[in-house]
């Protein structure tokens, strides 16, 4: 085996990229970088029926946004190109043929109708889901059950066929999983998987083994849902004579629903109001749009950090890690066996931590599209000031408008929040103060507060009487940063206008 670590992520371009997929990318990436190895992106597009237009480009964009770019890929090329399985189609047949010649695979000529009949005829109370396996194969139309001359005739006549692996009976297949330790499978319980389809395309089972071998992959990390396929893949490595080159395996734990029951799905996100895809995904077939973490207002650094912690920890109390720190600390033996519950509140906590680390200028740049979408200000200086004032209140970048809209637009004022305790003294105070600040030469929050306090004493009022009404006049509600800072940012004309509007409404 090559001494250099080589890992791969091999997605199918069939839709949006689930956060479990991004975590697989991340663990591959961290492992490769930690060991000074290569991270390969390979597109598994052999199932042409499930291929979705735009899905491959979407995968590249997601990885770019996360900062997890591969060393070799269909875009970048590399020494083992092509990296798209559909472009490697010519490679697989010879290996399928080699398996037939060695007696480890066979031609199967069954039609979809034949397969359906088999499922019905062999169905019993104890065997509710019959498969194409050692119990049924000899009743089917294949090169094991037919006479050799019949097989030759069918092949010569161009009869459609698939090539299936012939799973041995009663063998134990063992391997050491880097996360789970010793694993053992009984081959009698595994069906004869299709290796090469009637269209000449390989299935995942054949393609993943051939490609991992030819691309010199040393470690294969994938989700634990692939564990049932492991015995097929292990036997293919053995039957093709490549056992010595077989990568080390690690089957990653599932990301679970927030209640811990079952794998997290897109539907869970829709039901519970959080994203499960890295970025917005629009299905070109249905027109359905699924919101992504990026558009929800997550920073890529926070997204990567929270994913790293879904199933792994450094063995310390530390929770915030830069990508470089993750590279340094990451080890596969600290990945948990059990599934990791997805906690959206915790995800938002990570994002809040990263927003606090942004400069006001960085936050303003990220918030600009959200402000523009609501027809807010294009005043850059003001945007930067607002960013500094509301930063600590933000969990998502998308909260920027909700927390700061009143800086950019005159808010709707709820007069009922003031009306109960409104009186002539307060009215006189606000009229006098509005007049006084209209003539101020220095428009600055400390000067505004001093003038407010002096005017308040003149009218015999306390802060509790007039500070909240001022906030409601300027903000429209009982929230926001320091009220005099708000006045400083929105400016003299707008501050005075909002006070006069409120007095008129009351």
Image (tube, rainbow, N blue to C red):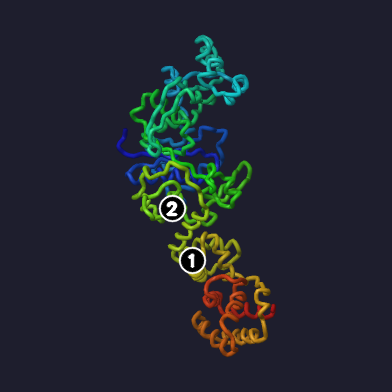
Q: Is residue 82 above or below residue 125?
A: below
> Which label was assigned to residue 48?
none
Q: Secondary structure at mark 1?
A: helix
Choose the circle earlier in sequence order: 1 or 2: 2
Q: Is residue 201 above or below residue 221?
A: above
Q: Residue furthest bottom?
A: 458
Q: Is residue 243 above or below residue 277?
A: above
Residue 346 coordinates in the image, percent (x, y): 49, 55
Q: Give the image quarter of residue 413.
A: bottom right
Of residues 428 and 44, the one drawn nearer to the viewer in this rendering: 428
In the rendered image, the quadrant that contains the C terminus is bottom right
Instruction: Look at the numbered discs 1 and 2 and tell me whether their residues touch, using CB distance below 8 Å.
Output: no
Residue 474 coordinates in the image, percent (x, y): 60, 75
Q: Residues within 10 Å of mark 2 (few under 14, many from 20)?
A: many
Q: Residues within 10 Å of mark 1 (few under 14, many from 20)?
A: few
Of residues 405 and 426, the one drawn nearer to the viewer in this rendering: 426
Q: Residue furthest front?
A: 126
> Which residue does the numbered mark 1 point to in the structure image?
392
> Which label was assigned to residue 305?
2
In the rendered image, the quadrant that contains the N terminus is top left
């Amino acid at each position: 085996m090559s001494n250099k670590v080589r890992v791969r992520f091999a997605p199918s371009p069939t839709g949006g990229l689930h956060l479990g997929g991004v975590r697989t990318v991340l663990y591959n990436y961290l492992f490769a970088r930690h060991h000074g190895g290569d991270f390969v992106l390979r597109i598994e597009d052999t199932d042409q029926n499930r291929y979705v237009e735009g899905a491959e480009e979407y995968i590249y964009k997601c990885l770019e946004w996360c900062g997890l770019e591969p060393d070799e890929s269909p875009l970048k090329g590399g020494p083992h190109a092509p990296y798209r399985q559909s472009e490697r189609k010519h490679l697989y047949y010879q290996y399928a043929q080699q398996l037939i010649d060695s007696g480890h695979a066979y031609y199967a000529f069954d039609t979809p109708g034949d397969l359906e009949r088999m499922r019905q005829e062999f169905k019993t109370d104890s065997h509710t889901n019959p498969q194409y396996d050692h119990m049924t194969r000899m009743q089917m139309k294949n090169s094991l059950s037919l006479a050799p001359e019949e097989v030759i005739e069918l092949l010569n006549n161009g009869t459609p066929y698939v090539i299936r692996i012939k799973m041995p009976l009663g063998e134990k297949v063992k391997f050491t999983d880097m996360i789970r330790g010793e694993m053992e499978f009984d081959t009698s319980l595994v069906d004869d998987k299709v290796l090469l389809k009637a269209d000449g395309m390989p299935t995942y089972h054949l393609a993943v083994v051939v490609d991992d071998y030819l691309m010199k992959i040393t470690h294969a990390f994938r989700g634990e849902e692939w564990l049932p396929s492991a015995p097929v893949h292990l036997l293919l490595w053995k039957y093709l004579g490549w056992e010595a080159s077989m990568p080390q395996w690690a089957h990653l734990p599932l990301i679970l629903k927030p209640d811990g029951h079952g794998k997290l799905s897109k539907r869970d996100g829709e039901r519970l109001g959080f994203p499960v895809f890295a970025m917005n995904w629009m299905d070109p077939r249905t027109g359905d749009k699924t919101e992504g973490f990026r558009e929800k207002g997550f920073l890529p650094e926070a997204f990567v950090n929270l994913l790293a912690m879904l199933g792994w920890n450094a063995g310390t109390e530390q929770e915030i890690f830069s990508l470089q720190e993750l590279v340094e600390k990451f080890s596969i033996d600290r990945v948990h066996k059990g599934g990791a519950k997805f906690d959206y509140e915790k995800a938002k906590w990570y994002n809040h931590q990263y927003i606090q680390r942004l400069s006001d200028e960085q936050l303003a740049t990220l918030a600009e599209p959200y402000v523009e979408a609501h027809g807010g200000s294009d005043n850059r200086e003001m945007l930067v000031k607002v960013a500094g004032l509301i930063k600590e209140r933000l969990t998502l970048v998308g909260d920027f408008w909700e927390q700061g809209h009143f800086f950019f637009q005159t808010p709707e004022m709820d007069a009922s929040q003031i009306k109960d305790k409104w009186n002539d003294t307060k009215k006189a105070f606000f009229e006098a103060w509005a007049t006084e600040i209209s003539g101020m030469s220095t428009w600055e929050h400390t000067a505004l507060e001093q003038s407010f306090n002096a005017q308040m004493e003149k009218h015999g009022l306390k802060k509790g009487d007039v500070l909240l009404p001022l906030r409601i006049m300027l903000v429209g509600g009982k929230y926001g940063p320091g009220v005099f800072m708000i006045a400083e940012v929105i400016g003299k004309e707008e501050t005075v206008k909002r006070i006069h509007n409120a007095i008129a409404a009351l």
